[in-house]
Amino acid sequence: LDQVLPLVADFYAAFGFPWDAGRKRALLAGLVEQPAWGALWLIETGGQIAGYVLVAHHFSLEFDGRVGLVDEFWIAAPHRGRGIGGRALELLAERLQQSGIRTLRLEVAASHADAAALYARHGFRPAGRELWTRLG
């Protein structure tokens, strides 16, 4: 957790999400302790942590079973543009498929064209629907 929390903080700052380090640490610890919820992977290159990906698991009748939701995917700025993100997505898909998850979903903001292009290069497509959220 000590290795990933600074990267998570960068992700939250980049998107303007509220940040509470203690709360996020506790949530990530819960995820690590409950593998049925999903998984957290560190992305490493050249002996350095370059980013992370957090995948939440859920069930979908529409998608014939277990689905992985890429909840957070972050490559630190010094490591971008070198193919690390694309390779991470491919390894993630392979690993999840081995565990019986054939469908991966994610969300991308329209304003993040570079991220959308990366996802498109690796087989992700818009689903033709909007993701709606209710908090509380």
Image (spheres, rainbow, N blue to C red):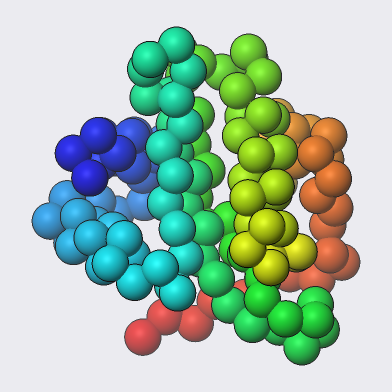
Judging depth in this view, the residue of 134 and 85 nearest the camera is 85
The image shows residue 124, relative to residue 86, as above or below, that is: below
Residue 8 location, quadrant? top left
Q: Residue 51: give x, y in percent of width and height.
A: 44, 31
Pick the quarter of the image with the N terminus.
Answer: top left
Relative horizontal placement of residue 119, taking residue 41 as reference (left or right):
right
Number of marks: 0
**Do we see residue 117 in this rendering?**
yes
- Which residue is painted at 78% across and 33% down in the image? 117
- Above or below, 110 relative to 56: above
Write down the quadrant of residue 31 in the picture: bottom left
Query: With respect to residue 65, does 126 lie above or below?
Result: above
**Farthest left residue in view:** 22
**Percent from the top left, x then y, of residue 98?**
68, 57
Q: Residue at x 85, y 45 (%)?
A: 123
For residue 89, side relative to residue 7 (left or right): right
Residue at image x 52%, y 58%? 55
- Residue 46 in the image: x percent, y percent? 45, 11
**Which residue occupies the foreground of this view, 35 or 74?**
35
Q: Can I make out residue 112 in this image?
A: no
If the image is split into quadrants, where does the C terminus sit?
Answer: bottom left
Along the line of sight, the residue nearer the viewer: 53 or 102: 102
Question: Going by the picture, which residue comes out furthest to the front?
Answer: 98
Q: Residue at x 37, y 17 (%)?
A: 48
Q: Quadrant of residue 82?
A: top right
